[in-house]
Image (spheres, rainbow, N blue to C red):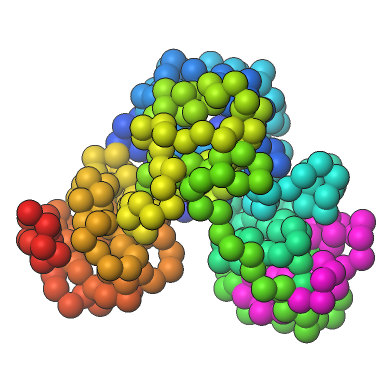
Amino acid sequence: MSGFVVKGWCPDAWRPMATGDGLLVRIKPRLARLARDQALALCALADRFGNGIIDVSRRANLQIRGVDQAGWRALVAELMALELVDADAQMERRRNVLMAPDWTDGDDSHRIACDLAAKLDRLPELPGKVGFVIDAGTAPAMLDEAGDFRIERGAGGGLILRAAGHETGVAVSAGDEAAMLVALAHWFDTSGGARSGRMERHAAPLPDWATGAIPPAPPQAPITPGPVRLGMALGAPFGQVEAAVLAQALADPAATGLRVTPWRMLVIEGARQGGIPGLIDDPADPVLRAHACPGAPFCAQASVATRDLARRLAPAVAGSLHVSGCAKGCACTHATAFMLTGRDGRFDLAREARAGSAAERTDLEPCTVLAHFGVA
């Protein structure tokens, strides 16, 4: 195994990514869910093969950090035994499916996701970051989440097929959804979409059968920490949790499983109690308004440490905050009220901006940033 430092692709279990704390191994939970025993086993593997840190990604994936090359293959074997990784590396790469996490057995989201999983071998070769979204609940939950080929609840109450970059979609009949997603992926491939990299950047006009005027239905309120229909929602600060902390949350005798979301939220199925140090159960916690990538020294692209600074700043900032180790802005792609971008070991500060945007103040030391916001 070699080539861990290649950039511009998404890692998975078969292609880990080198980071400042070792290899990062990504797990893509099927149906955005792990059974309780699977989740507890994953926590144990994170301690055994990694540094005990688990990331919760914006694609609702889990990532074990700090894995060394000597232990990587043994970790993958354990993950396959848990049915968390496909034995076929090509099939594992194709499982880029983002699913609304509040599904129930047999509902539209569950049905379509299972159907698409059975059709993954029919997909063309797609760019590594291209993926699918299944958002077929009573109202969309993931309109703001990235995904190229989408099934969503439409404004009229039915389901629509929608391509990213297009505000409206076309009605799709029950049972045809997964086949239509596969067909749209083939059209993307044959029309030169790989050159654009993502559907929203692909300029080719959609085929007639994928063109419609139905907008998505109004979105539902996002999940926040606290009791939810399925159990207890707990926030992972900056999308990261210690394996021992997650295992403690799963130790609730009422817990039956773990749902993973793209919002730094973990839902412990069946649980009703919070109060787990290291996880957020207060919807007013200011850290929920802050975004921060791993930063230095955990990412080779970052020149600054990020999360400690973000944690100190969050209570002092009115509105959203993003602290990025570099101009890539991996932790948050949309504009935030305050944007701190690392550059050559210092920070640039912008307002209502994305990472790398034109700054109003530049070359700031961390202590200067804290003083600017009145943090002692």
Q: Position of residue 193 (x, y in %)?
A: 65, 67
The quadrant the C terminus occupies is bottom left
Q: Is residue 202 above or below residue 292?
A: below
The part of the chain drawn in magenta is: 155-182
Q: Toward the viewer: 154 or 226?
A: 226
Q: Position of residue 340 (x, y in %)?
A: 24, 63
Residue 99 located left or right of residue 49 = right
Q: Is residue 132 above or below residue 60?
A: below
Residue at position x 44%, y 43% in the image: 281
Rendered image quadrant of residue 40 = top right
Tell me if residue 62 is in the magenta stretch.
no
Residue at position x 14%, y 64% in the image: 373
Rendered image quadrant of residue 106 = top right
Going by the picture, which residue comes out furthest to the bottom? 213
Can residue 187 be seen here?
A: no
Q: Position of residue 283 (x, y in %)?
A: 43, 52
Can residue 310 be seen here?
A: yes
Tell me if residue 163 is in the magenta stretch.
yes
